[in-house]
Image: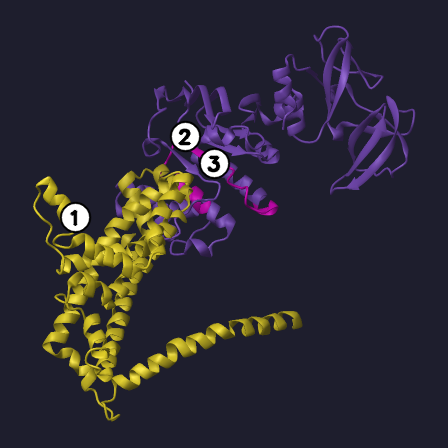
């Protein structure tokens, strides 16, 4: 049995549908991430789980028990809020002790727990500090400490790293993975940052417009996006109209590419996804089609170039720089071509294209 | 550097009128009051105007003033705190309206409003006429301390509501949600989160109600009918009826000390409160 089950959850605010017949199962001891653009319903899902919103229809099950209408303070889960929400009138120890005092734990137990939690988040000795005196990253750790001392079955995290700078964010990502492994509890993480989602999660749920677009391991989401929205949202990608000529052969921009996908039928229009780092740049005539480099930007490890070829501007990444105006060839190995069905209905298309 | 220096000079120039006003309108008159308070009619130094507070009638007036001011402040606080809670949780449109309703009386001169109560509370006033028509017992509180307290509460309640409301709407909703999330029930959220975070508003509210209540003479004159003698009335009479400016100034100085002491007490209570609430 899944630990948490959301069944046919619908929720609208001011007539605007945020979640539509949403279904999700969350297993025990899983790091699951809800990923999507703002307004996709991910935060609403989290708030429904936390008990801060009531769904219009549908049920929230916790270990097989219906908790849809249970008050937030009666649920066996704790939330780490986006803006930390530490109590400014209490010091660090008092903040961490808040939940334990409410549940009437003994003083010794509380003190032990505070010590343990501070050690867990690498802030030993911060008991007497005030909230203001802590940096954003430290406050975030305290918010996590305050939540986990209550030994929740599930920790809900609402974009907890959003306000931190890049370096700190990356550090905290590893910290969170470590915490999750040490505590052995379920983490439900909400973010719009695809890198965060891919780095930390066991399972990523890509959401848009209140629907789940795709659910899977980070590798599955990245390598085999199921539709154009997922491909576009997760990393950079070239999404091109193609025609599946037959099994293992796709025609893109007038050129024929060998691929490994089968079962799409003959002469069927499809969406083709090719990651920029998978485009092989060579001398003219050596690849599948020829083109001209139209822009070139150094972005750190590699150069990001646009190559005009066959009427499409291809985004390519390479460690070798090809100056603007250079004639080059491009090619892709068959297994790096990801073929996707075209959206069947207009509704589906709207979901895919809208961002 | 030079630019910011210029800016600072400019700011200094613009603060000039205010500083001049503070000097002429507050500091100089305070000096004059201190001078009158510490001298007798001939201009010789004396403490008799200060010590005069210990005379029976003065001490009684001071005690009554402190008592009534305290009662008014407590009533205002008891009314304003729940109101703040209601205003905080109400929807935005209604919020604006509710605040408006409570600020509205402040647009009218408070003497007029107090006078209105005089008319309402009179033995044959509107309230009693209505009660009589309904066959209910008459309300006989005009010219009693109760009427004065009523006037004080009515006049000063907005000064308690506003700072408390301001403090409460500044409380981030996520703090309240966090408290619920950590297992707190409604009472615990109120006691451990909302109340302590409202303390700054409560303290300024208390200050803004207690001080004018302690020193008022207009309310007690109009609603006390000369039977409720507050320290403010005595000082006023020394200045007007008795033309004894020295005694009036001396008693004013004593009042000032009392106000400073009360403020210090509130401040102290505030700090301790903040610590003990946790």
Q: Is residue A146 a member of the stretch shown in magenta?
A: yes
Q: In the figure, A346 relative to A26: above or below?
A: above
Question: What is the number of the mark on residue A53?
Answer: 2
Secondary structure, mark 3, is: strand
Mark 2: few, some, or many residues within 10 Å (few <14, many ≥20)?
some
Q: In the figure, A63 relative to B38: above or below?
A: above
Output the letter for the chain in yellow.
B
Q: CA distance from mark 2 to mark 3?
A: 16 Å
| Number of numbered markers | 3
Name the quadrant of the C terminus of chain A: top right
Frontmost of labels 3 and 1 is 1
- From the viewer's perspective, tell me whether residue A261 is left or right of residue A219: right
x then y, percent, for residue A115? 37, 48
Magenta-drawn segment = A141-168
Q: Which residue is mark 1?
A: B127
Question: What is the number of the mark on residue A157?
Answer: 3
Secondary structure, mark 1, is: helix
Disc 2: host chain: A
Output the letter for the chain in purple.
A
């Amino acid at each position: 049995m899944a630990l948490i089950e959301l069944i046919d959850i619908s929720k609208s605010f001011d007539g605007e549908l945020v979640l539509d017949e949403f279904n999700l199962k969350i297993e025990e001891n899983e790091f699951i991430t809800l990923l999507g653009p703002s307004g996709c319903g991910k935060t609403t899902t989290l708030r429904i789980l936390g008990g801060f919103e009531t769904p219009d229809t549908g049920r929230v099950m916790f270990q097989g028990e219906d908790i849809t209408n249970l008050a937030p303070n009666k649920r066996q889960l704790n939330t780490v809020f986006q803006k930390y929400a530490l109590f400014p009138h209490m010091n660090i120890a008092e903040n961490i002790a808040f939940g334990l005092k409410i549940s009437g734990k003994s003083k010794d137990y509380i003190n032990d727990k505070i010590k343990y939690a501070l050690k867990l988040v690498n802030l030993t000795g911060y008991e007497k500090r005030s909230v203001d005196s802590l940096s954003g990253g430290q406050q975030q750790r305290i918010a996590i400490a305050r939540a986990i001392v209550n030994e929740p079955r599930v920790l809900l995290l609402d974009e907890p790293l959003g306000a931190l700078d890049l370096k700190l964010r990356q550090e905290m990502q590893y910290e969170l993975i470590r915490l999750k492994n040490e505590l052995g509890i379920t983490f439900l993480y909400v973010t719009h940052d695809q890198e965060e989602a891919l780095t930390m999660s066991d399972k990523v749920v890509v959401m848009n417009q209140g629907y789940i677009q795709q659910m899977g391991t980070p590798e599955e989401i990245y390598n085999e996006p199921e539709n154009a929205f997922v491909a576009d949202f997760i990393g950079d990608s070239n999404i091109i109209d193609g025609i599946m000529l037959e099994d293992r052969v796709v025609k893109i921009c007038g050129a024929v590419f060998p691929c490994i996908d089968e079962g799409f039928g003959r002469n069927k229009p499809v969406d083709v996804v090719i990651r920029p780092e998978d485009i092989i740049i060579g001398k003219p005539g050596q690849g599948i089609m020829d083109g001209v480099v139209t822009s070139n930007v150094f972005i750190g490890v590699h150069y990001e170039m646009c190559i005009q070829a066959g009427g499409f501007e291809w985004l390519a990444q390479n460690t070798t720089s090809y100056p603007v105006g250079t004639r080059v060839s491009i090619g892709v190995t068959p297994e790096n071509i990801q073929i996707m069905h075209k959206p069947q209905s207009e509704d589906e298309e709207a979901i895919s294209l809208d961002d | 550097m030079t630019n910011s220096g210029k800016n600072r000079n400019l700011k200094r120039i613009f603060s000039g009128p205010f500083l001049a006003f503070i000097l002429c309108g507050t500091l100089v008159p305070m000096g004059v009051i201190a001078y009158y308070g510490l001298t007798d009619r001939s201009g010789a130094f004396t403490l008799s105007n200060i010590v005069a507070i210990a005379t029976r009638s003065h001490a009684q007036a001071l005690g009554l003033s402190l008592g009534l001011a305290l009662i008014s402040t407590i009533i205002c606080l008891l009314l304003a705190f729940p109101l703040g809670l209601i205003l905080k949780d109400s929807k935005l449109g209604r919020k604006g309206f509710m605040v408006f309703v409570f600020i509205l009386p402040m647009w009218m001169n408070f003497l007029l409003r107090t006078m209105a109560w005089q008319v309402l509370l009179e033995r044959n006033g509107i309230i009693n006429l209505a009660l009589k028509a309904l066959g209910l017992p008459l309300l006989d509180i005009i010219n009693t301390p109760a009427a004065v307290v009523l006037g004080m509460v009515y006049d000063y309640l907005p000064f308690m509501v506003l700072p408390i409301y301001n403090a409460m709407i500044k409380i981030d909703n996520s703090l309240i949600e966090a408290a619920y999330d950590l297992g707190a029930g409604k009472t615990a959220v109120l006691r451990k989160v909302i109340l302590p975070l409202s303390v700054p508003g409560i303290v300024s509210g208390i200050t803004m109600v207690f001080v004018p209540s302690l020193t008022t003479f207009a309310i007690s004159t109009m609603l006390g009918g000369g039977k409720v003698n507050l320290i403010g009335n005595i000082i006023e009479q020394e200045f007007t009826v008795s033309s004894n400016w020295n005694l009036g100034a001396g008693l004013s100085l004593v009042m000032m000390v009392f106000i400073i002491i009360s403020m210090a007490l509130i401040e102290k209570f505030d700090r301790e409160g903040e610590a003990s609430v946790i």
